[in-house]
Image (cartoon, grey):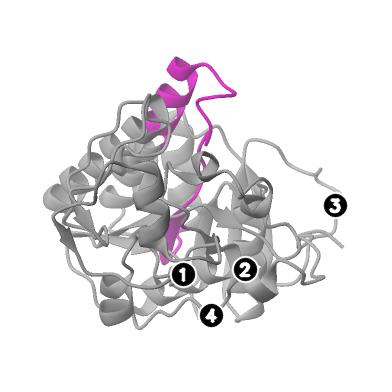
Amino acid sequence: MKRVFVTGSLGRLGRWTVDMLADEGHTVIGVDKTHPGSGTKVRDNVELKSCDLSTHGAIAELIQEVDPDVIVHLAAIPNPEVHPGTQVFENNVMSTYNVLTAAGRGNIPVTWASSESAYGFPFAANPVQPDYLPIDEAHPLRPEDPYGSSKLVGENIADVVARRYDIPIASLRISNVQYPGKYSVLDGRDSLQNGVGNFWSYVDGRDVVNAVARTLDADLSGHEPFVIAADDNYLGRPTMDAFKELFDGLPDEVSISGEDSALSSEKAKTVLGWEPNRTWRTAADENQPVPSLTK
């Protein structure tokens, strides 16, 4: 079992990640800007810390003090439509630089949350078709918004840190994360425009945590990006029918059929042995509460 340092631990994905890794027997050090209080009782196998990731000295000191076996960097501002773009970009880029650089200097492997937004389709001013389908790790990254741009720069930082310090870094290009009983993508799905930014793809948060867990034991080298998405779309209709309805034609190269996702997770399946086990058809109605990290 490992000592796992998880940033963004009090966010939705962070809580699932800390809880599930702790259930597997790992000792998890959860880090966030806030803290529930020094007298708060925390669940077994979990420690909670507070740190401003935008301050390099503070996060470097905390990582050195904790001395984890691996770092999982999830902290970010996710939505440029709610927060000022400058705040989104600066926060996400600086926190990623600070965490990854400190990890490199400490010779600590990193798994971090990049995003499908790095491709540039979500938050685009106008819907744009991909160069080919399905979209994989080789597809060009062309963001035009602060959030997607912050993830592109984050992956550039991962390249630099992996090259300079020779540590493995896994960038998970995660699709639209959904949670049991709260599949928000199903709201308004009758309008294809609502999901055109990622071509109606999604992934269950628990499957994301399983992907994170797979990277902890994977034999990786250098910086490796991985698409993390469910195998199907959430429309309940053929993906190509939706493309034809919204776009004038299809990409020249198409190798998906039926309700296949527009995002290909084949690399994660092959290299990490990961499989997306949840689908909207059953998970949307599950009654499983958000984990609490305190007693």
Q: Which mark is residue 40?
A: 3
Looking at the image, residue 138 sits to the left or right of residue 287; the answer is left
Whether residue 115 is visible, yes or no, is no
Residue carrying label 4: 277
Q: Earlier in the sequence, mark 4 or mark 1?
A: 1
Q: Residue at x 65, y 54 (%)?
A: 186
Callout 4: SS: loop
Residue bounds of the magenta highlight: 67-95
Callout 1: SS: loop
Q: Earlier in the sequence, mark 1 or mark 2?
A: 1
Q: Earlier in the sequence, mark 3 or mark 2?
A: 3
Question: Are the two marked residues, 1 and 2, in contact with CB atoms closer than 8 angstroms?
Answer: yes
Give whichever of 209, 10 is nearer the camera. Answer: 209
Callout 3: SS: loop
How packed mark 2 is, by other alpha carbons closer than 10 Å (few <14, some 14-19, many 20 or more), is many
Residue carrying label 1: 232
* Residue kind at label 4, given as amino acid type: Asn
Residue carrying label 2: 280
Q: Position of residue 283 (x, y in %)?
A: 68, 71
Whether residue 250 is visible, yes or no, is yes
Magenta region includes residue 85:
yes
The Cα atoms of the two marked residues, 3 and 4, are separated by 34 Å
Question: Are the two marked residues, 3 and 2, in contact with CB atoms closer than 8 angstroms?
Answer: no
The nearer-to-camera label among 3 and 2 is 2
